[in-house]
Image (cartoon, helix red, strand yellow):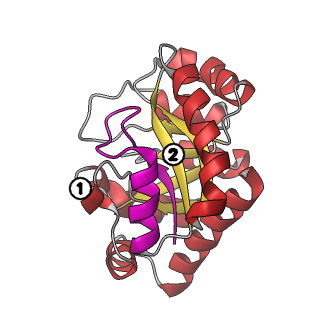
Amino acid sequence: MIDLHTHTTFSDGELIPAELVRRAKVAGYKGVAFTDHADHSNLELILENVLRLARKYSVYADVELLAGVELTHVPPSLIPELVNIAREKGAQIVVVHGETIVEPVARGTNLAAIEARADILAHPGLITPEEVKLAAQNGVALEITTRKGHSLTNGHVFSLAKKFGASLVINNDAHAPGDLVSQELRRKIAFGAGMDEGDYLLAEQNSLSIMRERR
């Protein structure tokens, strides 16, 4: 298993990165991306610290690590600029906090993230067919999430991604130890969204490909 969307004490997560990695390892994860919530105010601080840790801990923790950010509640018109800044500052993966139905995310966030070619659009809520088509064209992966609330639209996201050929990944959006779900529960959530075995394995392969490309 690989999780490309997690949070630590550098934003609103409960665990310091070292403990998150250890708990992920014990839970069966082979790769983890640190993607703390970021905007213009804290992006450099996050990356300065997690980049150093990812390089140093990956060898010793026996878990592949990526250092990145999740651009969160950033005004849509500023998302392309911040995606570029994140990459210039060394982010190995850029996630954008999508238009989940359980938070007041600004309309236009999904489209801005896709147009900016972020790596992953997290919990994109009631994403439109046009946006999913563009995500497929731009190589932006859409997230199937195990996180409560955000997961309410997993079925909608999967059905459109399947129809239009958009890439999918499965992530926990982990903020606390209990969010690192087991492989069994991860599969059940995927199947609950409408995936079959082939769809599930493809999503897992997509995560592995991103991890290998970005490390």
Q: Position of residue 97 (x, y in %)?
A: 44, 37
Q: Say which of 142 and 171 sits in front.
A: 171
Q: Quadrant of residue 118?
A: top right
Q: Is residue 130 visible?
A: no
Q: Position of residue 178 (x, y in %)?
A: 25, 61
**CB under 8 Å between callouts 2 and 1?**
no
- In reply to whether residue 113 is colored magenta, the answer given is no
**Dot 2 amino acid type:** Phe
Q: Closer to the camera: disc 2 or disc 1?
A: 2
Q: Say which of 28 and 150 sits in front.
A: 28
**Dot 1 amino acid type:** Lys
Q: Residues within 10 Å of mark 1 (few under 14, many from 20)?
A: few
> At numbered mark 2, what does the secondary structure look like: helix, strand or loop?
strand
- In reply to whether residue 2 is colored magenta, the answer given is yes
Q: Is residue 170 left or right of residue 90?
A: left
* Residue drawn at the location 33% of the way across and 79% of the way down: 188
* Residue drawn at the location 48% of the way across and 13% of the way down: 41
* Inter-mark Cα distance, 2 to 1: 20 Å
Q: List the residue tagged with mark 1.
A: 148
* Comes first in the chain, label 2 or label 1: 2
* Residue drawn at the location 60% of the way across and 27% of the way down: 48
Q: Residues within 10 Å of mark 2 (few under 14, many from 20)?
A: many
Q: Is residue 82 visible?
A: yes
Q: Position of residue 50 (x, y in %)?
A: 56, 38
Q: Position of residue 140 (x, y in %)?
A: 64, 47
Q: Which residues are magenta?
A: 1-26
Q: Say which of 127 and 173 sits in front.
A: 173
Determine whether 88 is above or below 27 in the image. above
Which circle marks residue 34 in the picture?
A: 2
> At numbered mark 1, what does the secondary structure look like: helix, strand or loop?
loop
